[in-house]
Image (spheres, helix red, strand yellow):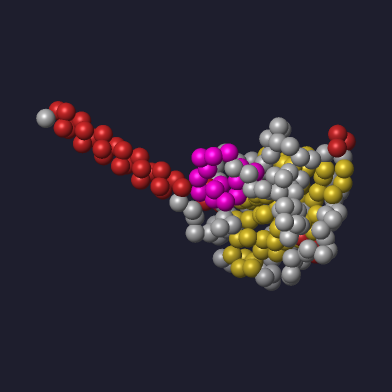
Amino acid sequence: MRRLIALLMFATSCNGSAQQRAADTRLPDCEACGAAEAPAGLTATMTIAPPEEPGERLIIRGTVYQPDGRRPAAGVLMYAYHTNAAGAYARRGGERGNAQRHGYLRGWLLTDSLGRYTIHTIRPAAYPSATEPQHVHVTLTPPGGRERWVESTLFADDPLLPERLPRGHPADAIVRVERQAGDTLLARRDFVLDASGRREIGDFVLKAEARDNRDPR
């Protein structure tokens, strides 16, 4: 009898493990989203690419503003992801959620009290097919709001521009890149939570706005 109970418990455990694995590998309905997978303990800085990741080191800095374009928007959750130096959404194996789509070069942050953010990563490569320019995918989630996709960050010196500029992609989402000491690249992109913009998110609409590349810090 005890052996039978042990076998039943083992079978139940295996079935539960299989169900858990299936749940872990189930793809989210929203292909571009990532806010729901954000870890705890976020700061205003995210590091997407570890130091050993091949590619040109890149820093993207900026500020997220309230709809008036002047007041900073604190506590906005930013999610970003991009390709590696070979133009692939690289995976290491065992990914869950949208990491199965986006790969391991992704990250999250919360804007600080002045709405500022910093991303440390590498410059993404274009897809091997060269059908789209280099880009960084971004979503923003204001406090109490829903996650919303914004136009990808493109790079003004990308050789695929302007020929491969996506139809309708705003020019203000294209950033200039400056080479800093140590060959690190620096770009700047600001975002405005704009009530008259194109994309609704609760009571807000998100509009991306790229400003100059001057380092404010």
Q: How many marks?
A: 0
Q: Nearer the viewer, residue 213 or 72?
A: 213
Q: Which residues are magenta?
A: 92-114
Q: At which x and y percent is residue 107? A: 63, 44
Position of 119 compared to 163: left or right? Answer: left
Quadrant location of the C terminus in the rendered image: top right
Q: Nearer the viewer, residue 189 or 24?
A: 24
Q: Residue at x 67, y 70 (%)?
A: 198
Q: Residue at x 30, y 42 (%)?
A: 15
Q: At which x and y percent is residue 27? A: 49, 53
Whether residue 180 is situated above or below residue 148 in the rendered picture: above
In the picture, residue 91 is in which quadrant?
top right
Q: At which x and y percent is residue 64? A: 71, 54
Whether residue 196 is situated above or below residue 125 in the rendered picture: below
Whether residue 136 is situated above or below residue 93 in the rendered picture: below
Report the residue that reaches farthest toward the left.
1
Q: Is residue 97 magenta?
A: yes
Q: Nearer the viewer, residue 202 or 108?
A: 108
Q: Residue at x 51, y 40 (%)?
A: 94
